[in-house]
Amino acid sequence: MAREQWVNLTVNNKWIGEGITDRKQLSEIAPMMVRFAQPGRHVFYLKKEAKANNAAYSATEKPRRLGFRPGTFNRRRFRTHQDGTFLLRQRVTLAGGDEYTFTVENVNGKTKSREVHTRRKLYYQIIRMNGAPALSAALITQFESQFWNTANRLYVKMVQITPGRTIPAMVNLDDTVPADYNLVCQQARAQRDNSKKPYSVVTLLVRKNCIRGWEDRPIPTTFTGPTHSFQTLDPLYDVADPTVDWYGRIRWVPNGGGAPHNIPKASCTRAGQGQFGVQINTAGLPRNVPGRLEIRLRIIEIEGMGVSFSGNNLTLVATQDAVGTAVPPATVVAITNHEVGHKIGMVPGPQGTRALDKQSSHYTGRGHSGPHCHTGTALAANFMTVVPAPTATCVMFGDISSNTANFCGACLGSLRKLDLRSRTNRGLRTQF
């Protein structure tokens, strides 16, 4: 029977369980005891073979990590200690699903073989903000199966720890606001299970994750009646969170010169104007005079669906859109797959893990933030302006228009080869 070697985990008894029964199964060093029936200094030979379908690290990848090199050999000479034993400590790769055969041969030609199969394991905890729905058992299974995918030889065992923890509700979490982000982190830390650090990822299911910004621009305007309405380019922020003031400044400036007229918030109405509209009471403002409105209004700059923080083990996933409509559960799972994918190094290339070669489908920017995959769609200058929406077929695309929870073939290859040790992944070893 082959030994499963969990190559990313440190040698520590706290990992025993969920398929691990012995410390010898931990780390990329696979210890194997050679024991002769009689004491004495016995000569023996070792052969290390790697299966043909093991992960293929490139010539440029192999020098970057010792664990990227198979290090196979046909015949290497060893000699036991006086008691007739010798502890072999052979390295296997850091990939999941690799298979090795170690064959020991004595001077009489007698052989004995041991198979070692590589696996990886990570732990995850889902903490839910009150008002955010829990994931069903079926959806949890769907999430885990994307990382433990034996058909594609992807063996990352995701183990859920301490389910059912919650924190107080917040209408919208703008994680770029330090006070809000720090409060939510403080609340989540009180519910966090850190018994599996540094190999645990926390996913916080929040209600909304809309990020604020400012819209500053002039709008040609001539007042002709008792009221005047105008439209912003982006939804005003009170759509996402009515407790945050949308008003910054509005003033009207005549084109022909003269003093500007400040328009206070008290003269403005949002009611009945939809996501983009503001109505101004023009009493006291010049009529039929060409001019311009100069606005500075708080808008929704990003309608966030999820984020993976590069400096710690926290990910956020939104369960509502900006107006409070529930995100479909299957989409929540897809976003979770996406953000956890980022957490462990996807997509290889600039801004992703640099231990692996740049992935063929890798892109950065183009309307999105961070390293993503464009499998299934042409590489556009700005994916946010593509009409109709892009037809990407990978969960690591930069937005939810990909409409899938699955990793594409290119991403599966990278996922299989990633170095998932905590000492090489700040997002795993650093608790939020």
Image (spheres, rainbow, N blue to C red):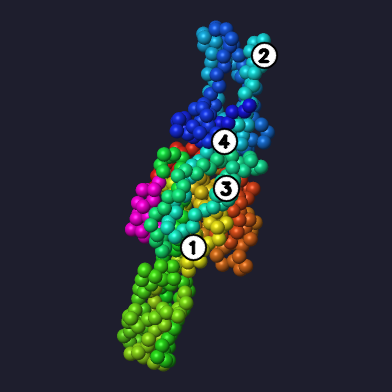
- Of 82 and 140, nearer the camera is 140
In magenta stretch: residue 277: no
Residue 107, position in %: x, y? 64, 10
In magenta stretch: residue 185: yes
Residue 346, position in %: x, y? 54, 48
Question: Distance between the Cα atoms at labels 1 and 2?
Answer: 65 Å
In the picture shown, does residue 206 fall above or below 273?
above
Q: Mark 1 belongs to which amino acid? A: Gln
Residue 423, position in %: x, y? 45, 37
Q: Residue at x 38, y 72 (%)?
A: 246
Tell me the crowding category of disc 1: few under 14, some 14 to 19, or many 20 or more residues within 10 angstroms, Cα based: many
Tell me the crowding category of disc 4: few under 14, some 14 to 19, or many 20 or more residues within 10 angstroms, Cα based: many
Residue that numbered label 3 is attached to: 141
Q: Which residues are magenta?
A: 174-192
Instruction: Judge depth for marks 1 and 2 and give the one in front.
Output: 1
Q: Residue at x 64, y 16 (%)?
A: 105
Q: Secondary structure at mark 3?
A: helix
Lower sequence index among marks 3 and 2:
2
Instruction: Judge depth for marks 3 and 1 and give the one in front.
Output: 3
Question: Distance between the Cα atoms at labels 1 and 4?
Answer: 35 Å
Label disc, if present, on residue 110 of the rendered structure: 2
Q: Secondary structure at mark 4?
A: strand
Residue that numbered label 1 is attached to: 320
Q: Mark 2 belongs to which amino acid? A: Lys
Lower sequence index among marks 1 and 4:
4
Is disc 1 in contact with disc 2, using a CB cutoff of under 8 Å?
Answer: no
Q: Main secondary structure of the magenta part?
A: helix
Q: Mark 4 belongs to which amino acid? A: Arg
Tell me the crowding category of disc 3: few under 14, some 14 to 19, or many 20 or more residues within 10 angstroms, Cα based: few
Question: Distance between the Cα atoms at labels 4 and 2?
Answer: 30 Å
